[in-house]
Image (cartoon, rainbow, N blue to C red):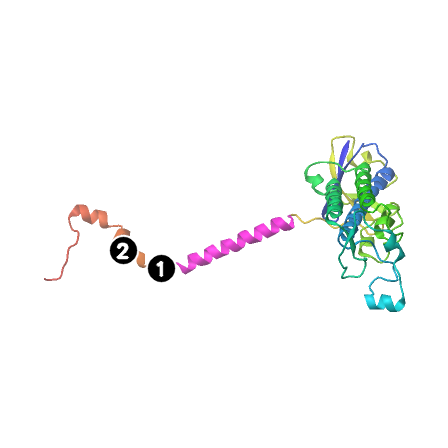
């Protein structure tokens, strides 16, 4: 199995295994699915953290309005009255005005937060350092755990316009958001390796050979964006350490230049003829009359 280290730009994403005989059409779709699946898990985790703190999403026509404006316009959050957390709620106002402020109690909040941590661990980038591959099954498992935690805390479900429910139902609308810039559709995905475009019409072995123990670094891009930029020879962390070393070295040289006092050369211990005069018996001779 060929081991693929998938990157987006200079940032590591995950590891994936595939036989050398795999069609690149199939492999590209597989990489795109795992890549987008990880992004979905991250988005759901982010929204669930807000759910745990401030409750369910407000209707679109009530978001960003003050209490007085809602009262003047006679708006009502019907879904908010239905979708209440189990074991009661605690009011915690959302300063942004996106959620209704009816947060779960501390016990239910911990259920959500613990599940979020577990889901993040499943798709963590640390798996690259641990040499652990991420599969679509792992991504689905993370989503199932998150879905289960939401059902435990909100047995009546979430409003249909809540981004968490929309993500679970694959109805999310990311247009105009920052998250949309990261998502790469399966049809637009393109893999690059060693500054070469891995064309979908070929097989993986056409590029890496028939050695099934090969490890390669591939970068995922949108089609039409061109070849990804080459990575720097040294990482940013290594560059910081190098600059720190040179800075310390310059400080040491400055101190040596400042400490160039030669008065110590007149000391008795610095006289290189003292031993000779000692044996000749001419030590401490004074020529002036007393």
Instruction: Name the residue nearer the viewer: 290 or 53.
Output: 53
Instruction: Name the residue nearer the viewer: 161 or 82.
Output: 82
**What's the distance in space between the residues labelled 2 and 1, CA to CA?**
13 Å
Q: Percent x, y for residue 101?
A: 79, 57
Mark 2 secondary-structure assignment: loop
Q: Percent x, y for residue 234?
A: 64, 48
Mark 1 secondary-structure assignment: loop
Q: Quadrant of the C terminus?
A: bottom left
Q: Which mark is residue 207?
A: none
Q: Percent x, y for residue 157?
A: 86, 47
Left or right: 223 with respect to 111? right
Range of magenta residues: 234-261
- Identify the residue at horizontal 86%, vertical 54% (top origin): 81
Q: Percent x, y for residue 67?
A: 82, 65
Q: Is residue 5 visible?
A: no
Q: Which residue is mark 2?
A: 267
Find out whether residue 255 is within the magenta segment. yes
Q: Quadrant of the N terminus?
A: top right
Find out whether residue 56 is within the magenta segment. no
Q: Which residue is mark 1?
A: 261
Disc 2 crowd, CA 10 A, few/some/many (<14, 14-19, 20+):
few
């Amino acid at each position: 199995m060929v081991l693929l280290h998938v990157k987006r730009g200079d940032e590591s994403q995950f590891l994936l295994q595939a036989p050398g005989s795999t069609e690149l059409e199939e492999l590209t779709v597989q990489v795109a699915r795992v890549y987008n699946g990880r992004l979905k898990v991250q988005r759901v985790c982010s929204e669930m953290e807000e759910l745990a703190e401030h409750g369910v999403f407000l209707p679109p026509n009530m978001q960003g309005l003050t209490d007085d404006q809602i009262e003047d316009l006679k708006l009502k959050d019907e879904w908010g009255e239905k979708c209440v957390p189990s074991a009661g709620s605690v009011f915690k106002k959302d300063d942004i005005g996106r959620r209704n402020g009816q947060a779960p109690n501390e016990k239910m909040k911990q259920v959500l937060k613990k599940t979020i941590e577990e889901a993040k661990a499943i798709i963590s980038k640390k798996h690259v350092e641990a040499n652990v591959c991420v599969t679509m099954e792992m991504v689905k498992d993370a989503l199932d755990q998150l879905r289960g935690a939401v059902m435990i805390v909100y047995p009546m479900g979430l409003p249909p316009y809540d981004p968490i429910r929309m993500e679970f139902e694959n109805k999310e609308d990311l247009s105009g958001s920052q998250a949309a810039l990261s998502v790469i559709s399966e049809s637009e995905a393109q893999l690059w390796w060693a500054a070469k475009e891995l064309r979908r019409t070929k097989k993986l072995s056409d590029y890496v050979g028939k050695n099934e123990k090969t490890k390669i670094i591939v970068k995922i891009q949108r089609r039409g964006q061109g070849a990804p930029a080459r990575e720097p020879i040294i990482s940013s962390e290594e560059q910081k350490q190098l600059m720190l070393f040179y800075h310390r070295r310059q400080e040491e040289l400055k101190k040596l230049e400042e400490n160039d006092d030669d008065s110590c050369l007149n000391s008795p211990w610095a006289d290189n003829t003292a031993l000779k005069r000692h044996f000749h018996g001419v030590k401490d001779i004074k020529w002036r009359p007393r």
